[in-house]
Image (cartoon, rainbow, N blue to C red):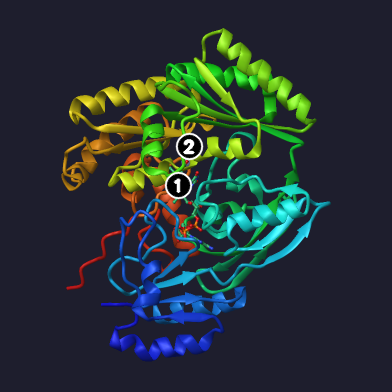
Amino acid sequence: MAAGTATNMAPRLSELAASFSGRLLTDPQDTAPFLQDWRKRWIGRALAIAQPDSTQDLAAVVRWCVAHQVPMVPQGGNTGLVGGSVPDDSGRALVISTQRMRKIRSIDPINNTLVAEAGCVLETIQRQADAADRLFPLSLAAEGSCTIGGNLSTNAGGVQVLRYGNTRDLCLGLEVVTAQGEVWDGLRGLRKDNTGYDLRNLFIGAEGTLGIITAASLKLFPKPAAQMTAIAALPSVTSALQLLALAQKHLGPSLTAFELFSCTCLELVLEFIPGAQDPLSERSPQYVLLETSDAESESHAVASFERLMEQALESGLITDAAIASSYAQSQALWTLRENITEAQARDGKNLKHDISVPISSIDVFVEHTSAALESQFPGIRMVVFGHLGDGNLHYNVAPPRGVNPEVFMNQEAAVNAVVYDAVEQHRGSISAEHGLGLLKAQENVERKSAVEIALMRSIKQALDPLGLMNPGRVLPLLPQPVLL
Ligand code: FAD
Ligand code: 2HG
Ligand code: ZN
């Protein structure tokens, strides 16, 4: 069934269309992009796509869904990687897209805050902050399409968490449409507020399962005086950890990014991303892309960065390095890191594991897990990269060359068991920054304590008693009682 073709819903849809001023998409050509995720792993169906124009408009849509018991799937830029933003294939849900709610409501350079509507694209927020001589530091490869509502709902990480924290740390207040269709105005720009339970932090990272974020008050920061970017070649992940400690000693809080990627990742980018170039003369097992954002001056940035790189070379921690001497060169280095996801998508099907373990355990984790996978799945290709400074790796794996990708994908549960058992042994997390969505909801329940899951279920029950908000995401659906 294509969107909007459920005949018994047709009169109701016209009632919905009349109840709000935004757009309602029902033509299959218009709805198709909203029904498939970025990875093309999940393709669903929906009653329609509602695109409200304002908070009150969105609240009216939610109230209509409540009245008619229609499940809702909030959607921002649809760049999520865990299947949270697309409906299931029942065709019963309404996708509520924030794409028409894109206003920057205010910027306060003294309070260092910016209030944005949920559908604002991250890059637009970065630009507006920049125009006000401030920095909004959230940065990820999908920033040209993902929205702040989606970033908050997944508590996105990205490449500057090391210095500025994840999205949760960048938010001071929220406006939310509740699962009942009421508007909660929690858009406070306060750095101190101890007035009871922290509702804002419940909605952040909830992946649209508790309510719909409609606007946010975001923290701004001073712009750095100068930035330096470099890529370093290293013999091992252990050397990368030692380089991290050295960089933190030399640069302190000026170290804003510390990203690890393997030779396999680099080679994928060189193969699939036109214009990508290796700046170093020889291949190396591992690479680190590091960036410093200096508050003082360009000369201070250059001096401290060069001292660090010299010492790292002299001590043999790194075998080679290229330091960008212009913005264009810095962008070219970032291309190698930021395009790994795209290159992997072009390479074909793969299994993603967005995991975190204590930073100090990362080398042991990689060594043991890779050995276990290689022995169980000969020829498996490890595509390991990520935010080393946060203890967060994208421990992705691709089928052995020549193996039918479908056959490999059928082994997903067995591959996941190896990776997630290792994560558990290190008291790590099976989802560091992408969320649970559909992909990991069941795995999470199986690996967390009964106490923790019961607490999560009681929060869900309290805020969304009808279970209409993004059902089955974060918490798997419970079996329905059989009516005799
Ligand atoms: P969507 O994909 O539309 O939705 C994501 C989830 O949030 C869904 O569950 C949806 O229902 C819910 N949601 C969306 N909007 C709202 C709202 N207003 N209210 C309530 N719920 C809502 N993620 C990282 O953390 N770090 C990275 O470095 C990173 N890099 C990426 C690189 C690429 C190339 C791609 C494709 C993705 C990357 N991601 C990364 C994942 C993704 O971009 C983030 O999860 C992002 O935060 C999703 O934003 P979105 O607007 O696209 O949300
Ligand atoms: C990144 O860090 C993203 O580039 C995407 O989080 C990771 O493709 C992935 O698995
Ligand atoms: Zn990431």
Q: Is residue 34 left or right of residue 159?
A: left
Tell me the kind of residue under disc 2: Leu
Disc 1, ligand 1: is the CB inside 8 Å? yes
- Residue 413 in sight from this viewpoint: yes
- Residue 445 in sight from this viewpoint: no
Question: Disc 1 marks which residue?
Answer: 434
The picture quadrant where one finds residue 295 is top right
The picture quadrant where one finds residue 375 is top left
Can you tell which mark lies on residue 336?
2
**The C terminus is located in which quarter?**
bottom left
Instruction: Identify the element where label 1 is drawn.
Output: loop
Can you tell which mark lies on residue 294?
none
Q: Is residue 94 left or right of residue 293?
A: left
**Residue 4 screen position, x and y as percent:** 34, 82
Q: Is residue 73 above or below residue 395?
A: below
**Residue 360 screen position, x and y as percent:** 48, 21
